[in-house]
Image: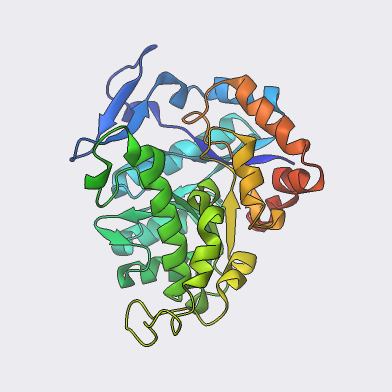
Amino acid sequence: MIVDFQHHFTPRELIKEDPGDRLIVHFDAHGAPSYTVHSLLYDLDEHVRMMDTAGIDAAFLTSAAGMCASLEVSRLCNDRAKQAERDYPGRFIPAAHVHPLGGAEAMRELNRCAQELGCPGVVITSETDGLFLDAPEFEPFWTEAERLGLFVFVHPALKLNFSQQFDGYDTARSVGREFSLVMATIRLINSGVFDRHPRLTVQMSHLGGGIAGVLARVRGYQDKKFWGVEGHPRHGRTAEKDFDYYIANNILFDSAGFCCAIGAVKAALAEIPASRIVFATDYPQEVRARGAVADFVRDLRALGGEGEQILSGNVHKLLTRR
């Protein structure tokens, strides 16, 4: 069974202006492009046609509009994702959308998603509201996600906390988000989130922002004594176990985020085992054509056993509740 673990939609009622055949680009407060709206986002019939063409059995359905959003918007996205599951039996798997800093009401909505809607996982962003994932304010969310048995899908922040350095060339989206994911991975591990919540599973999107390319350097800087920061309250912190232990036990990386380019997956495999990567496309944002997704599936199959493991062999590691 092939599941696309990063597959997006937007409920039609959340798109105020009819895009028709146009692209409508939203910008953040610093003028950086943050999201591109188009009609394919709510055309689920076309989503299914693409999946049929590419040989994808099902898609884990998330909405950017509901990521770290208000309770009202979160509920709407949750209900529409569940409706998509009903309307297209076997093709869509609904994600839970709640704001991790939303307090008791958000946690009640998370429970509704898990217990009534049957969502196997919840989506949040790599940073939000001026805070990062190692902030103590996130602790109630990690506790509840672990208790409910939900995996946490960490999507790159649509609006970075600090985007000033990405003030041109659309770099907030092209590389700023990837840097945010690398940082989110390091913060989750070194802050001890997985030590406090050992049964927690995180799906880190976009191959962890391409973390494989800098993973040897990250490992090197885990030697706090060597770098002279041992005992420092912030820079000297490490997790209880070796950095790679958490990659092998708590984190799965998805193959989205690189426009379905097989080279990104090959590069990731130099440092991340295929057993820790799940298939994902980022459809219909970074890729919108049926043929491009079909080519990506074909290219993964050409990798042999590693490709097959990414395509279908690791599905059960996230869909343990289904």
Would residue 116 be seen by someone viewing this image from the given angle? no
The quarter of the picture where residue 75 lies is: top left
- Residue 148's place in the image compared with 203, above or below, is below
- Residue 82 or residue 123, whichever sits in front: 123
Along the horizontal axis of the image, is 202 left or right of 309?
left
The quarter of the picture where the N terminus appears is top right
Which residue is at the far left?
Answer: 29
Q: Provide residue 76's location: percent of width, then percent of height.
A: 37, 40
Q: Provide residue 140's location: percent of width, then percent of height.
A: 37, 70
Which residue is at the far right?
Answer: 305
Q: Provide residue 282's location: percent of width, then percent of height.
A: 52, 36
- Residue 126's place in the image compared with 248, above or below, is above
Residue at the image position 32 percent from the left and 69 percent from the top: 135
What colour scheme was applied to this rendering of the protein? rainbow
Residue at the image position 32 percent from the left and 26 percent from the top: 15
Q: Provide residue 21's location: percent of width, then percent of height.
A: 39, 11
Along the horizontal axis of the image, is 197 left or right of 14?
right
- Residue 215's place in the image compared with 243, above or below, is above
Residue at the image position 47 percent from the left and 61 percent from the top: 185
